[in-house]
Image (cartoon, rainbow, N blue to C red):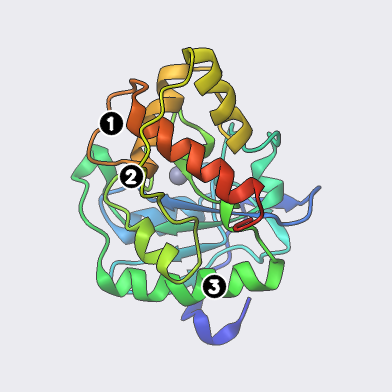
Amino acid sequence: MTPWLVHRKVASPNWDERTLPITMAVLHYTGMKTGQEALERLCDPEAKVSAHYLIDTDGTVTALVPEEKRAWHAGKSYWRGEADVNSASVGIELVNPGHEWGYEPFSDDQMVALMPLLADVIERHDIPRANVVGHSDIAPARKQDPGELFDWERLAQLNLAMATPSARIALLYDNPGAFYLAMERYGYDISDGRAAVAAFQRRWRPNRIDGEIDGQIGGILFELLLERDTGHAR
Ligand SMILES: [Zn+2]
């Protein structure tokens, strides 16, 4: 933790020891009516949930769990072969009521607080950009956060996340299986195919989230894999 990026510390009891080095960052929304309610829940021993950082709508950054400890934000999840995402990641919660309580755009203050915090986390742990993910990317059948209103492009402009490919080429894979395998290779859990496609769309093509494979998301996935696997991004 870099002190000047954090405004206050509120210790959450909800953590244990990591069993893996940090190689990922996971972004969430809180999905509760208020920031205060979210903070209380993230510190409630009964709730058994936490994150390393919480960012309120006014940009206040609260550190809850030391980065070297394993916070409990990912739940049952999977990314690039790893099922213990909590052990491998830093978790950042953004206050937002979410789809259940009135999903709203993330405030500029929140984004302005997130960007240097995330940049610092990425740099200190040398996290590959392809491993800066949303909760829905790692738990597609259960989660929708941070959701389609989250401005991934703003992060990508600062090289804090993979940029969304232009998808100039539409690409239909020979069959759905080939598409799912390509998604798996990028990192997604494909055990629920429709949910995985919807999660992919929420992140990479948020103006149409229908769970259906089409040529545009095929092109996007192909470009993402090329970009990552040829080493232009990691
Ligand atoms: Zn979440």
Kindly give the residue lying farthest to the bottom in the view shown: 4
Which numbered marker is on residue 229? none
Task: Confirm or deny contact between disc 2 and disc 3 (CB under 8 A).
Answer: no
Q: In which quarter of the image is the C terminus?
A: bottom right
**Looking at numbered disc 1 in the image, what kind of residue is underneath it?**
Ile
Q: What element carries label 3?
A: helix
Cα distance between the residues tagged 2 and 1: 11 Å
Sort mark 3 into few (<14), some (14-19) or many (20+) by Cα contacts within 10 Å. some
Please tell me which residue lies in front, 75 or 182: 182
Asked if residue 85 lies left or right of residue 205, the reply is right
Cα separation between marks 2 and 3? 21 Å
Q: Residue at image x 47%, y 18%?
A: 193
Closest to the observer, 73 or 158 = 158
Residue at the farthest right position: 19
Query: In terms of sequence position, does the residue under pointer 2 or pointer 3 come before the other?
Result: 3
Q: Which residue is drawn at 35% across and 69% down?
A: 111
Mark 2 vs mark 1: give the one in front.
1
**Nearest the camera: 27 or 6?**
27
Which image quarter has ligand 1? top left
| Element at label 1 | loop
> According to the image, label 2 marks what residue?
147
For residue 209, the mark is: 1
Q: Where is residue 77 in the image (x, y as percent from the top left)?
A: 59, 33
Q: Estimate the spatial distance between the alpha carbons at disc 1 and disc 3, rounded to whole Å.
A: 29 Å
Three-letter amino acid code at the position of disc 2: Gly
